[in-house]
Image (tube, helix red, strand yellow):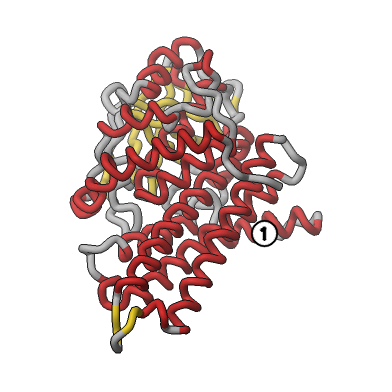
Amino acid sequence: MNFTPDADQELLRDSIRRFMKTEVAPLVAKHDVEKTFPFELMKELAQFGYIGGRLSEAEGGMGLDQLTWAMLMEEAGYTWLSLRTMLNITNGPIHKLATEGTAAQKERFLKPLLASDRSVFTAISEPGTGSNIAQVQTRADLQGDHYVLNGRKLWITNGAFADFGIVVARTFSPDCQGQLSTFLVEREVSPFESRRVDTMVLRSTGTAELSFDNVKVPRENLLGEEGSALKRMLVGLDAARVNIAMGAVGAARSALELSIDYARTRTQFGKPIGSFQLVQKLIVDMTVRVEAARALALRAASALDANQSDARMACSIAKLYATEAAHEVASMALQVHGGLGYSTDYPIERIFRDTRGGTIPEGTTEVQTLIVGREILGMSAIA
């Protein structure tokens, strides 16, 4: 199977790399320390397809296929995993609004998202609910012309920054008795509390805990049909897993290239450390993991493009392997760099932290293992 970029993809990739190197990379260290995010970059990144690029041209996108989108995710991850995460958290709602939103919702929410005039979060996880979406306890009660939301959401990416989000809640109305629905909740229209949650990884992504205490949400802000959220949320997970996998590949490639440069220039005992057998072993092991992870992730993206029957398994395999491999590569890169790798003045320690963050969201490594096992054996280990 050939995943070599064609001429147009190469041109796009080269343009992205120039932009990332000159406009994004110089900002990373500052924002990682200050735990902020340069939202002004989103408008500029739109020219490459990073904002809604998977939508058709009629919908305001570029009609990018999964393989091209995977390439974009690798380049974002190479430069800054927080950036890839914020792109993912933006494009997920864009697709949901494009496919499920009413005309009014598209005008009010989708249009400004595509223009990067507003930022968004998706609130699923709760203090007692992680991998099992069906256990969501946040409640939405229909009362006249609005829903009343009560509950808490935790580990919400961009929850500290965004002015609106998609909230998943257990819904109660004459037509829905406890099934999950999704709601568009605006901070100004339906005020809720948010508390910044500092994390070891992805420090610029505004992770937060959100609290909804009798928060009134207009009835017209129901996104999609009542009670249909669980099935709809699961549908988008395969593509999200490829996004994370390719971002991990990018970060691993960055750690590898930094290590190669360092091994060639750092001298010990009168010669470059790259001439030492054990350092070469580390570089080779890193290279194998990067190449294998990329191949698996591109294979999964291709399976999604072709709507192949094994696409789900391919996406889980890619996510499982690439995220674990990326952190292994970052660990080996730290070993190559020695004491310098610990320094916050050098990117290795950030890559080491951030690659650890990929093994949990969109289904942990353990969940991916169970999914692949179910696909292979035809028997579920999940009750």
Residue 378, above or below 269 = above
Identify the residue position indicated by label 1 in the image: 370
Residue 364, image x, y percentages: 54, 57
Residue type, numbered disc 1: Leu
- Answer yes or no: is residue 237 visible: no
Q: Is residue 368 left or right of residue 23?
A: right
Q: What residue do we see at 38% from left, 15% from top? A: 108
Q: What residue do we see at 74% from left, 46% from top? A: 310
Residue at the bottom extreme of this rendering: 269
Residue 309, above or below 232 = below
Residue 189, image x, y percentages: 30, 21
**Could you say which is closer to the camera, residue 360 or residue 381?**
360
Q: How many marks?
A: 1
Q: Is residue 150 left or right of residue 63?
A: left
Residue 383, image x, y percentages: 69, 56
Q: Is residue 204 left or right of residue 133?
A: left
Query: Quick one: label 1, few (<14), some, or many (20+) residues within 10 Å?
Result: some
- Answer yes or no: is residue 336 visible: yes
Residue 135, image x, y percentages: 55, 47
Residue at the right extreme of this rendering: 378
Q: Is residue 271 left or right of residue 87?
A: left
Q: What residue do we see at 37% from left, 40% from top? A: 86
Q: What residue do we see at 25% from left, 38% from top? A: 38
User: Would you identify the image quadrant in which residue 302 lies?
Assistant: top right
Residue at the front extreme of this rendering: 270
